[in-house]
Amino acid sequence: MGTPSFFYHNSIIGGRKLSDIDSVVAEALQLFTDLQDLKKVYSQKVMRLEHSFSEEDWKEHRKNGLFLFKYDRPVFNKDLFLQLIRDVCNCIKRNRPEIKEQIKSISKFFDGVTDDFFEDFLLDGHKVSPSPLSFSPEEQNLLNFVVRQALYPFLEKYVSLLPQEVGDDGWQRNYCPVCGEKANLSYLRQEDGKRYLICPFCGQEWLYRYLACSWCGNEDHKSIRYFEVAELPGYEVYLCEQCHGYLKTFNAKKAVSHEDWVLEDVKTIALDLLAQQEGYTGPGKRIM
Ligand SMILES: [Zn+2]
Ligand SMILES: [Zn+2]
C-alpha cells in the first residue's frame, strides 16, 4: 500500500471517479513530489549505522532465501520518525483537504507508539498489526501508507550501506532480498537488457528473469504477454495468464531516461488502470 496505486484506490474515498485520468495523475504527481522532497530532507538526518551480519547469516540468506531484515534491521529514531509522520500528514492534508478528518485520526494513533512498533511493522507484512479497531479499511490503508512514507529514509539508509552483491544473480527470487516485499515495477537495463525488480518499500533492486512473472514465478512464455501504449513510451506491462498478475516494466532500450521510480510509477497510473480493466491485479491489491 505504499505504492502510488494506493493513491487512486484512495482517491475513491474522496468521492471522485477515475474518468479523468489526467487530473488524477497530475494531483498524484503533486502529492508524491511533495512527499519525495520531504523524505529527501529527512534522509540527511538519518544516522549511518554499520550492519551486523555474520558469515552464517549471509550464507543462509542466499541458500534459503531469507530476507535480510530477519537478521539485522534498520535502527529507527522514534523522534525523527514522529516528526516525519507529522510532516507527511500535513503534506497529505494540504494536497487532499477532503480527507483531513481521516488524517486527524491517523495522527492521533501515533501518540501511543512504542519502540516495538517498528519491529512489528517490518516483520508483520509491512502493516500496522493489529490495526486499530475503530479504523475503517480506508483509514487502515491510509495509516499504513503514512507509516511507510515515514520509514523510508531509514530504510533507504540501511539499503545504501549493503554490499553490492545483495540482489545479484545469487538471489533471483520474486521478493525483495532486504525486506521480503514483492516488486511494484521492473526495468530492463540499457547496456545488457538484464531485468531488475524494484522494491516499493525499501527501494532495493534485484536481478530477475526476463519475462518471468514476478508474482507467481511462471516463465512459460506462451502464458506471458505484454502490452504498451504510445502515450507512455518505454513502458511495457507484463501480463501473466496463470495468476492474472501484471507488472509495469520500463525498457531502457525504448526510452532515453526516467525519473525517480516513485514518480515514474505515478506517471504511469493509466497502465495500472488498463491492466486492471482487463482483469489483472498488481501492486496495491496484492500484498506480499
Ligand atoms: Zn525491500
Ligand atoms: Zn503469474
Image (cartoon, rainbow, N blue to C red):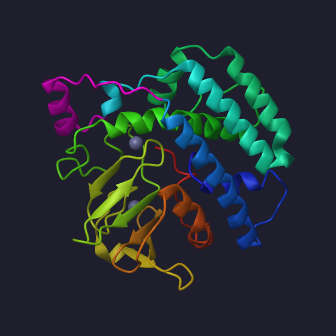
Rendered residue at 56%/39% (across/down): 41
* Magenta highlight range: 46-67
Q: In which quadrant is the N terminus drawn?
A: top right
- Residue 251's spot in the image, x, y percent? 37, 73
Q: In this rendered view, identify the residue nearer to me: 86 or 138.
A: 86
- Residue 224's spot in the image, x, y percent? 37, 73
- Residue 165's spot in the image, x, y percent? 19, 45
Q: In this rendered view, identify the residue nearer to me: 160 or 235.
A: 160
The answer to whether one can see residue 129 in this image is: no
Q: Quadrant of residue 108?
A: top right
Rendered residue at 55%/59% (across/down): 263
Rendered residue at 71%/72% (across/down): 22
> Is residue 55 one of those drawn in magenta?
yes
Asked if residue 57 lies left or right of residue 188, the reply is left
Q: Quadrant of residue 180?
A: top left
Q: Quadrant of residue 9?
A: bottom right
Splitting the image into four quadrants, where does ligand 2 fall? bottom left
The answer to whether one can see residue 30 in this image is: yes
- Residue 257's spot in the image, x, y percent? 42, 72
Asked if residue 156 lies left or right of residue 31, the reply is left
Asked if residue 145 lies left or right of residue 136, the reply is left
> Is residue 140 one of those drawn in magenta?
no
Q: In this rendered view, identify the residue nearer to me: 119 or 266.
A: 266
In the rendered image of this protein, does residue 75 appear above or below residue 5? above
Rendered residue at 72%/43% (across/down): 91
Q: In this rendered view, identify the residue nearer to me: 157 or 54.
A: 157
